[in-house]
Image (tube, grey):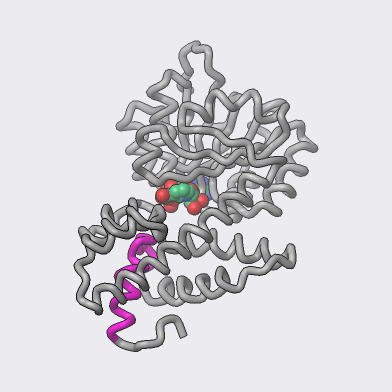
Amino acid sequence: MPTEPMTGWPTVAFVGLGHMGQPMARRLLGSGVPVRGFDVAAAARDAWAAAGGTAFGSAADAAAGADVVILMLPDSGVVEAVIDSGGFLDAVRPGATVVDMSSSEPERTRTLAERLAARQIRLVDAPVSGGVARAETGELAIMVGGSDADVAPVLGLLELMGRAFRAGPVGAGHAVKALNNLMSATHLLITAEAMLAGERFGIDAEAMLAIVNASSGRSGSTQNKWPNFVLPGTFDSGFALRLMLKDMRIAAGLAASLQSPCGLGERAVQVWAKAAAELSPTADHTEIARWLREAATRTTEIGT
Ligand code: NAD
C-alpha cells in the first residue's frame, strides 16, 4: 500500500481524473498535497501515474484514510454510484469531508448530504467554471455550497484550484453552476445565430467579433469560445456537448420546480437537445455553432 509523505495538507482522495479532474488533481499534487487518485478508466489512471500521482484500484481504496474525498465525475448518477460502490462508505472515515466538484443536481446533493451526515461524513458542493485551460492554471471559479463549519476546513485546498465563492448552504453551489451554464449555453446559441446572420449579410466574422467584443453583445462566448474554438475550427474546448445539455436540463428543471419562468431557457434546451441527437456523443459543446450552421443549410427553421 503506497504511503503519503507528511505535509501540512490534509490527505486527499481524488475520484474522477477526466478532462477537468486530471489538471485539478495535478494542481493539488504540484502544491505538495498528498493525493490518492482513482478513475474507472485505465487511461486516466495511467495519465495520473505518468504525472507522478499515485493511482489506486477503486474509489474505496483511494478514500481509505483520506481526510477529504474530492469527486469530479460526470453527474449526480455517477456520484451516487461511486458513493454506493463496494466498501466506499466504510472506507471514508467519520469526520472526513466529501467535496463534490462535479456539476451535479442540487436536490440530489441535499439528499446525499443527509445520507452522509448520518455517518458523520460532511458534504460540500464545489462545482467549477473556467474549463480545462483555467483548471490547468488554477484559476477556476469555484461555487461553494455548505455550512461554514463544513466549508472552512477545505477552503485552503479549493483555493489551490481557483477562487472560491460562497453560494449558500449545501446544494447552492450546484444550483448556481447549472444556472450559470444555462446562461452560458444560451449565449453561445444566440451568438451562433447572430454570427450566421452577419455572415449571410457579408460581414467578416473576425470584424464582427471585434465590434461585438467592444459592445454590449459580448459574453464568454464572443470573448473566448468563438475566437479560440469556433473560428479556428478546432472545437476542442474539452467540455462535452452532452454535459452542457445535462446542466441546462438541471437548471430548467430547477426553475420549473420553483415555478420560476424559464421560457427562453427551455427553448434553448430544445435546440441543444436536437444538436445532441444529431452529433456524436463525444462532440465538444462548441460544436453547437458548426451544427447550427450546417442545419441552417438544410432548413431555414432551426430547432423545430
Ligand atoms: P470527463 O468525462 O472528461 O471526466 C469524468 C471522469 O469520470 C472520466 O475520466 C470517467 O472515466 C470518470 N468516471 C466515470 N464514472 C466513474 C466511476 N464510477 N468511478 C470513477 N471514475 C469515473 O468530464 P469532465 O469534462 O472532466 O467534467 C467533469 C464534471 O465537471 C462534469 O460534471 C462537468 O459537467 C463538469 N465541468 C466540466 C468542464 C469542462 O470544461 N470540461 C467545466 C466545468 C465543469
Q: Residue at x 54, y 63 (%)?
A: 248
Residue 258 x, y percent position in the rendering: 74, 63
Residue at the image position 73 percent from the left and 65 percent from the top: 257
Toward the right, the furthest residue is: 118
Q: Position of residue 23 (x, y in %)?
A: 38, 36
| Image vertical order of residue 187 relative to residue 123, above or below | below
Residue in front for this viewpoint, 115 or 143: 143
Residue 264 x %, y %: 56, 72
Does residue 205 lie above or below 159 as drawn?
A: below
Question: Residue 210, position in %: x, y?
Answer: 26, 56
Span highlighted in magenta in the image: 280-297
- Magenta-colored stretch includes residue 292: yes
Task: Give the left or right position of residue 293, taking residue 31 as reference.
Answer: left
Task: Please name whichever residue, 90 or 274, is drawn nearer the observer in this view of the structure.
Answer: 274
- What residue is shown at x 48% (from left), y 73% (from top)? 273
Numbered-mark total: 0
**Residue at 58% across / 36% down in the picture?**
165
Q: Main secondary structure of the magenta part?
A: helix
Residue 55: quarter of image: top left
Can residue 61 be spotted in the picture? no
Is 24 in the magenta? Answer: no
Left or right of residue 163, residue 301 in this image: left
Residue 195 in sight? yes
Residue 225, located in which quarter of the rendered image? bottom left
Front residue of this view, candidates 204 and 67: 204
